[in-house]
Image (cartoon, rainbow, N blue to C red):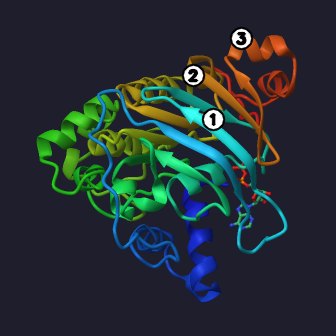
Amino acid sequence: ASIVAGAIGALSEVMGEAQRAAGATERLLELMSVKSQIQSPAHPVALPPRAANGASLTLADVTFNYPSRPDTAALAHLSLDIKPGETVAVVGPSGAGKTTLFQLFLRFYDPQLGAIKLDGVDIRQLDLHTLRDAIGIVPQDTVIFSTDAMENIRYGRAGATDAEVIQAAKLAAAHEFIERLPNGYQSFLGERGVRLSGGQRQRIAIARALLKNPPLLLLDEATSALDAESERLVQGALEAAMQGRTTVIIAHRLATVQRADRIIVMEDGKIVETGTHASLVALGGIYANLAALQFHHVHSVHAAT
Ligand code: ATP
């Protein structure tokens, strides 16, 4: 599942089927504010001062089941220590719990057991805005709003100056294609405006994340295959986005897992293998199978899923 779909799922558990008719974007934004069962604590704790290389993220024996499936653990006794500045790739078969992990980081749901800590603070003790301000998301299915390119990127941080937006676009390898649009940064995007390619949408999402400049970046890598040029640009943009922060990636691309500091292999809500690409291939287990069958190679012509 994707983060956006997950967010909608979390909200519809709360709001009921009737809300499913409304626009996905609105629901996502509502979810990001207040209409969830998840509430900010009455007396929130402040995060410690931000470190130069990003946040630490700790999962301590986390067990979680979705409210609608009380008998099935989507995550079971999961423990994980992610250090500031680390890049962790999460891989595993469909239904392994990868997206669920992200949803818990964002506090769309709380675990039934265990705790998740950002820079040592249980995220349930943080104001929701503090938590979500600290996390940047590059989703698989980037939402492009019906506004111009400048404002689309500015969604990353309301109040950013035009110069800051352009700087982020340059780092995200989005500047050049935006400049070539009929009206440059004033070009209207979305269904009634310029339709962007998959790779261009992803670079808009990366530009937003760069503008937000969060200590923790969650990346849900697109499963769709891109042409080689687009792939190269997206990979370069991701590289820039990971600098100076902690990154957790739901990875579908060989280039991404090869570059990760650590790969976490999940299955049935558990971590079943962990290591680097080379060590896990040598192990000849689940990861080795996935690597052989599932990953998109940078220059592959066909989607592998
Ligand atoms: P994929 O690679 O297909 O995106 P995933 O590893 O991200 O899979 P999750 O989406 O985290 O897997 O799902 C983990 C488990 O939780 C699965 O058994 C799934 O069916 C279940 N699940 C996911 N979302 C919900 C939901 N909103 N309500 C109930 N069960 C859910």
Q: Relative to 298, is 137 above or below? A: below
Residue at 33%, 46% in the rendered image? 208
Residue at numbered disc 1: 225
Looking at the rendered structure, the secondary structure element under dot 2 is: loop
Q: Residue drawn 72% across and 25% down?
A: 274
Q: Nearer the viewer, mark 1 or mark 3?
A: 3
Q: Which residue is mark 3?
A: 278
How crowded is the residue under tag 1: few (<14 C-alpha within 10 Å), some, or many (20+)? many
Residue 276 at x, y percent in the picture? 67, 17
Is 122 on the left or on the right of 267, as rendered? Answer: left
How far across and down, in percent of the image, does residue 233 sit? 43, 26
Q: Earlier in the sequence, mark 3 or mark 2?
A: 2
Q: Position of 224 compared to 168: left or right? A: right
Image quadrant where one finds the N terminus: bottom right
In terms of depth relative to the viewer, which is nearer, 238 or 242?
242
What's the distance in space between the residues labelled 1 and 3, CA to CA?
24 Å
User: Compared to 16, does 79 lie above or below?
Assistant: above
